[in-house]
Image (cartoon, rainbow, N blue to C red):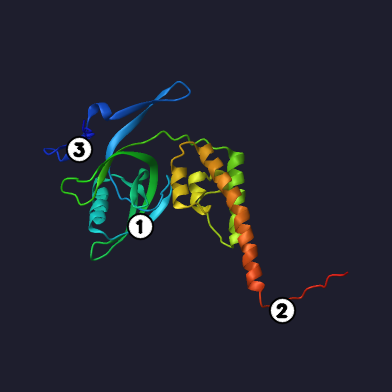
Amino acid sequence: MPKKPLLTFDSNNCCYIIKPFLAFNFQYLTSGLFYIIMTNFIAIFPLAIVAYPGEELNLHIFEPRYKQLINDCKETQKPFGIPTVINDNISELGTLMEVTEIIKTYDNGEMDIKTKGLQVFRILEIVKEVPDKLYNGAIVNYPANNEKSNDVLMQKVIEITLKLHTILKVKKEFNKTGDKLRSYDIAHHTGLSLQEEYDLLGLFDEMQREEYLKQHLLKVLPIVAEMETLKSRIQLNGHFKNLSGFNL
């Protein structure tokens, strides 16, 4: 039996209508409470990056379809979604983004814009053809996200991250004070691969995300330290060495 679409297009009102029984999804928490996951249609801008909630992302918009998308978002004051593209495939998860400012509009319609991440979404169905639009869309819902942090664990993550930066001789400025930092704020600064950043996006509990980052950093730190030592040895090769002889 073919899969029934999650939405239909209302040509009279020029909008998509989500089937009523799919508009909300109830999920059960371990506490015995139910919560509701809203389902809606959003325009999507697939990119080979992971954007996190709270992240400020600057973009240069040059493709006609995305120039149209941003202009529509500006006009309607609606957000858009950035689903992550991995290995040329659109992944299930992404982050809802709002356009906070259009910095510059060029003569050819290209734009420099500022955006900010709002919340993680899960794609239920991709809408490849949106009437009168060049861009694609998707029907999405928004998984519940537990943002309660473990302060001790997060401070450990920050401490190891700063050690990593010291070894690599890089200086990164965080946009929050240490006690306000959360996993989303620091993830891009820990040397995660695109796949690992996406895996973190799929964790909907802040303490799980903090533990994920800690384990990653504890694995990476000694490797980076050894590589830096190796680099120093290579750089010393050919230089005059002032070494003490070994006493027999």
Considering only order in the chain, which callout, 2 or 3, is on the residue closer to the N terminus? 3
Q: Identify whether 236 is placed above or below 170.
A: below
**The disc label shown at residue 59, or none:** 1
Considering only order in the chain, which callout, 3 or 1, is on the residue closer to the N terminus? 3
In the picture, the quarter occupied by the C terminus is bottom right
Give left or right: position of 86 versus 179.
left
Amino acid, disc 2: Phe
Q: Position of residue 169 (x, y in %)?
A: 59, 63
Q: Secondary structure at mark 2?
A: loop
Distance Cα–Cα, label 3 vs label 2: 74 Å
Pointer 2 local density, CA inside 10 Å: few below 14, some 14–19, many at least 20 = few
Pointer 2 residue: 240
Pointer 3 residue: 16
Q: Position of residue 231 (x, y in %)?
A: 62, 67
Pointer 1 local density, CA inside 10 Å: few below 14, some 14–19, many at least 20 = few
Considering only order in the chain, which callout, 2 or 1, is on the residue closer to the N terminus? 1
Q: Position of residue 107 (x, y in %)?
A: 23, 66
Give left or right: position of 17 versus 51.
left
Q: Secondary structure at mark 3?
A: strand
Amino acid, disc 1: Leu
Pointer 3 local density, CA inside 10 Å: few below 14, some 14–19, many at least 20 = some
Distance Cα–Cα, label 1 vs label 2: 49 Å
Q: Residue at x 63, y 58 (%)?
A: 225
- Residue 9 visible? The answer is yes
